[in-house]
Amino acid sequence: MLNISHLSFSYGKTIVLKDISFEVKQGENVAIIGESGSGKSTLLKLLYGEYDLNGGQIFWKDTEILGPKYNLVVGYDFMKYVAQEFDLMPFITVEENIAKHLSRFFPEEAQQRVDELIKVVQLEAFAKRKVKTLSGGQKQRVALARALAKAPEILLLDEPFGHIDNFKKQSLRRSVFKYLKDKNITCIVATHDKEDVLGFADRMIALHDNTIVANAQPKELFENPESPLIAAFFGEFNEIDGEIVYAHQLKVTDTSQLKATVIHSYFKGCFYLIAADLNGDTIFFKHVKQLIENDTVYLEIDK
Ligand SMILES: Nc1ncnc2c1ncn2[C@@H]1O[C@H](COP(=O)(O)OP(=O)(O)OP(=O)(O)O)[C@@H](O)[C@H]1O
């Protein structure tokens, strides 16, 4: 169990996190969300022991995670952190980067492990390539594999698929998160992307105003978004009479109290996102067909 109690941290005078407490069970996948600058990366760095806390404590089982004031070398063997800027060794190959920290006394086992991880991050075709010749997304996958090489108990991931194209992203997510679950590796992911959360995270923690404003299962938060911050994470939404209504929860009907004027139809693939004026406010709803500008539509809320 990872136990964070009353954690506080500032960069100089800039307060970033104030009195944060939460727990993460072994094998759990927890997503940290929040606006840019809300302190997601800072929280991961604190969990890793990169900075000294201003207050509070972090424990993994019986080990207290301490910062540079107490540790000559930052970090702990049982934990790996994949930062947004991954520092790989550019002049050696993908395989060599991953194998770097594996024992040289058991070359066969090391090679098997490298092969297994290259498969997890779907880089089979690039195993023998020098890292400096890879794209940003490919490097990100090498950094992930390298973090997994020594089988950490906890993995801290900062926007782990941010550099990876949509084409590859979904299958890579499934592969990596399945691997972590299979190996019972605790995983904490800082992300802006709901796709990193839905279907994978057991729990979601939202940071706002230096503190935790939500800590619950993604389904629970999706169904009852307590604030615009949470709703916005999941998608387009409106505030109608003080109520949060997702764009997919507004339906066109024959007649209703909600009379709106179409402003624009955005083609979104299998639906159109319609912007419309409702009593002077712009609202958004999903519709199967394109609607004509300035047409009147009646809407109902279908939750
Ligand atoms: N090394 C640093 N020194 C001083 N201030 C910093 C430092 N790193 C981050 N900050 C500030 O701390 C706050 C939190 O930053 P952090 O990077 O943790 O946010 P974030 O939620 O991860 O943002 P993003 O989603 O953009 O990555 C921001 O206001 C940022 O400007």
Image: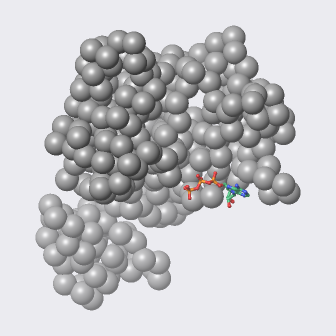
Q: Is residue 242 above or below residue 292?
A: above
Query: Residue drawn at (42%, 61%), measured in percent from left and top?
Result: 237
Q: Position of residue 229 (x, y in %)?
A: 54, 55
Number of callouts in the render?
Answer: 0
Query: Residue drawn at (44%, 64%), measured in percent from left and top?
Result: 238
Given residues 112 and 280, the one toward you in this image is: 112
* Quadrant position of ligand 1: bottom right
Query: Residue drawn at (34%, 49%), measured in percent from left and top?
Result: 131
Q: Position of residue 295 (x, y in %)?
A: 23, 85
Query: Residue drawn at (34%, 31%), measured in percent from left and top?
Result: 177
Q: Is residue 246 visible?
A: no
Residue 182 picture quarter: top left
Given residues 114 and 269, the one toward you in this image is: 114
Q: Quadrant of the N terminus?
A: top right
Q: Is residue 234 above or below residue 292?
A: above
Which colouring convention does the figure follow?
A: one colour
Residue 289 picture quarter: bottom left
